[in-house]
């Protein structure tokens, strides 16, 4: 028996990482949505000002994935918050 097979080992670890990524994405999405609404922007306006497709903004706000750092910086700039504000609550 391989160590990765014992009790679900590696597979269970990968699943836990996916769950953690999902939680990070959900928190980022909540933060982004809240900041966008504070600025009075629609998702389309945010996407246009951040030079991103609307579908990407929608996907991020729904908690599906995490953007690259350069996109986080652009989004923060558009909604006029610090990067740390978009990352608030993410461990």
Image: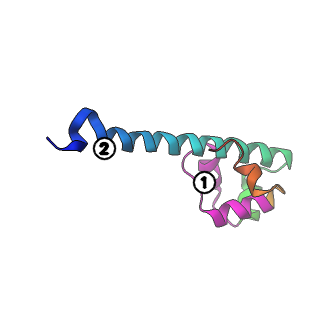
What residue is rendered at 22% in x and 43% in y? Answer: 3
Q: List x then y, in percent, for residue 50.
A: 73, 64
Task: Name the secondary structure under disc 1.
Answer: helix
Q: List x then y, in percent, for residue 15.
A: 39, 40
How far apart are labels 2 and 1 at the CA level? Answer: 33 Å
Left or right: 53 in relation to 32 = left
Q: Which of 69 and 37 is in front in this view?
A: 69
Q: List x then y, in percent, for residue 59.
A: 59, 49
In this rendering, is residue 70 above or below 15?
Answer: below
Question: Mark 1 Cα within 10 Å, few/some/many (few <14, many 20+)?
Answer: few
Left or right: 12 in relation to 5 = right
Q: Main secondary structure of the magenta part?
A: helix
Q: Which of 36 and 16 is in front in this view?
A: 16
What residue is rendered at 55% in x and 46% in y? Answer: 64
Q: Name the residue under label 1.
A: 55
Q: Nearer the viewer, mark 2 or mark 1?
A: 2
Q: List x then y, in percent, for residue 41.
A: 81, 51
């Amino acid at each position: 028996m391989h160590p990765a097979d014992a009790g679900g080992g590696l597979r269970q670890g990968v699943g836990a990482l996916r769950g953690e990524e999902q939680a990070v994405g959900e928190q980022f999405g909540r933060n982004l949505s809240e900041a966008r609404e504070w600025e009075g922007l629609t998702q389309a306006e945010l996407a246009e000002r951040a030079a991103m497709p609307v579908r990407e903004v929608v996907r991020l706000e729904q908690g599906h994935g995490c953007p690259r750092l350069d996109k986080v910086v652009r989004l923060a700039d558009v909604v006029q918050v610090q990067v740390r504000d978009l990352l608030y609550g993410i461990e």
